[in-house]
Image: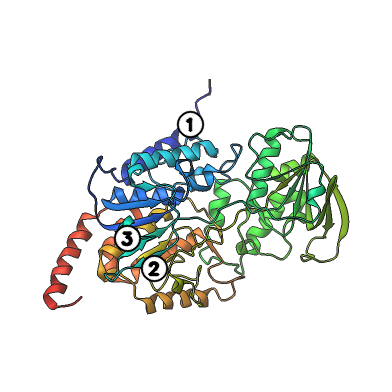
Amino acid sequence: MSGFHPIMWVYMLVQWFLDRLFSSAPPPPNAKLRRPRIAIIGAGLTGVSSAAHCVGHGFDVTIFEAGDRNCVGGIWSRVNNTSGLQIHSIMYRFHPSVRWDQGYPDRGQIVSQITQLWKRYGLEERTKFNTKVTSVEKDLQGRWIVNSPSNGRFDGILAAVGSCGDPKMPHVPGQDKFKGEIYHSSQLDGKHAKGKKVIIIGGGASAVEALEFVVHEDAAKADILARSEKWIIPRNPIVDMVLALNPFGQETIFSWIPEALLRRFFYRDLADLAPPTQGLFTETPMVNTDILDQIRSGRAKWYRGDILSVEEDGVRFNHRAQGVPKGGPGKEDLIKGDIIIMATGYQRPSLAFLPESVFNEPYAPPNWYLQTFPPEYMSVCANNCTYVNAIGTVGNYHIGIYTRILLMFLVDPLTRPQEPLMKVWIDMTRWIKARSVGGAFEFFTYSELIWWFVFCIAINPFRWKWALFVFFGMGTALPMKVVQEEDKLRNGLGVN
């Protein structure tokens, strides 16, 4: 029998309060919802959350999912059972009604929460499975057609295909002659590694997934072959939230402070594993504490270098010293192992179903308004689809905020951004982040994202009445009433 945990009890109480305060009421069964009608593409975490926000506020949706019923939950429906959340669940509140019973839930609980949300808001009857979206285009009345008119017409498009699609499984020269087993990091359920030597190729989030399997299986040893420099930050909610507070979303003259603190108090005796020149605020870091503990215990070893080939009994590897770039000189080693896990990530799902014009430079994704709205179409929101690198989380409150911004644009004509002004915002952000490695929208922090939202509302006085709705999902009656009066005034003046 588990003991009483006061901190977890308080956490559960806070979640109950957030649910009561911010969750919108699910519509009654077979309710006829009003326009605008939204087409949501994808039934993963983002798609289900966005749909729940829409129908909770009384707006009609249809979810188009390329897979079957088992695909509800997106990437979480496909990863290993040993996988879990690396950031604390307090930073993974993709809907106010989510109730976590532990700080770091596993894959099973995450899928369960997504499925409960899907059922709670009656989304089963609004989901079309086995329906891959290949095109969205406007009809003569300016409404969106998804694939064909038989699917109906929509006022807005919310793409929620995410950033992780099919497993990326590159072919390494010589891998056919390896005598052991080769798996992708997402395909480890039912596999066994007890007492075996495991080689993990890759050093990102997929490597964390592979390491969880290695620890769970009690493997003899894990050799991690990382092809690039990557920061590792502790699995600590306070540290992770503090790092996400950088409002500039890039390296600053103060960035050396958190980097030095991480080297001194987190890496400690393994400081040589920290990137020597790459800044912390340039790429998504690995969030894991176990990996350094495993290295210290001798049960894991971290190699930095280049994969040369696969041999019968292992991987031939060019081991580079700290700071030596990819392909640079190093010491050639044969890393022996019984199992190779390809921690090489996932292919990014395509947005090719969107109109071709949204991909024209210099305003191709992720260089869009608020990173998610293509300047040509304010009625399209690619929620969590254009994300590249960040310190924060893809599964938090911003999903609802983006969804409600789209609803605001569709309901209230006076809040809609014009294409030239959307491009001005993009160019302004580029100018502010001109020194950002990789580009202004290649990396952001969560506090920068909040600043974007605040700016979006503050810059247009007609959006002020929607502030409570956009940020908290509250108070729709007043702005809707104001919109009705504004419509009467505009119609009386003959203004469209």
Query: Which sits earlier in the primary sequence, circle 3 or circle 2?
Result: 3
Mark 3, Cα crowd under 10 Å, few <14 / some 14-19 / many 20+, is few
Residue drawn at (62%, 45%), measured in percent from left and top?
Answer: 186
Question: Residue 6: which numbered mark, if any?
Answer: 1
The answer to whether residue 164 is left or right of residue 459 is right
How far apart, in angstroms, are the residues tagged by discs 3 and 1?
Answer: 55 Å
How far apart, in angstroms, are the residues tagged by discs 2 and 1?
Answer: 39 Å
Q: Is residue 3 at least partly visible in the picture?
A: yes
Q: Position of residue 415 (x, y in %)?
A: 29, 69
Amino acid at dot 1: Pro
Question: Residue 312: which numbered mark, if any?
Answer: none
Residue drawn at (30%, 60%), measured in percent from left and top?
Answer: 153
Query: Which sits earlier in the primary sequence, circle 3 or circle 1?
Result: 1
Contact between labelled residues 1 and 3, with CB atoms less than 8 Å apart: no
Amino acid at dot 2: Phe
Question: Residue 455: which numbered mark, if any?
Answer: 2
Residue bearing mark 3:
149
The answer to whether residue 24 is left or right of residue 356 is left
At mark 3, the secondary structure is helix
How many numbered discs, if any? 3
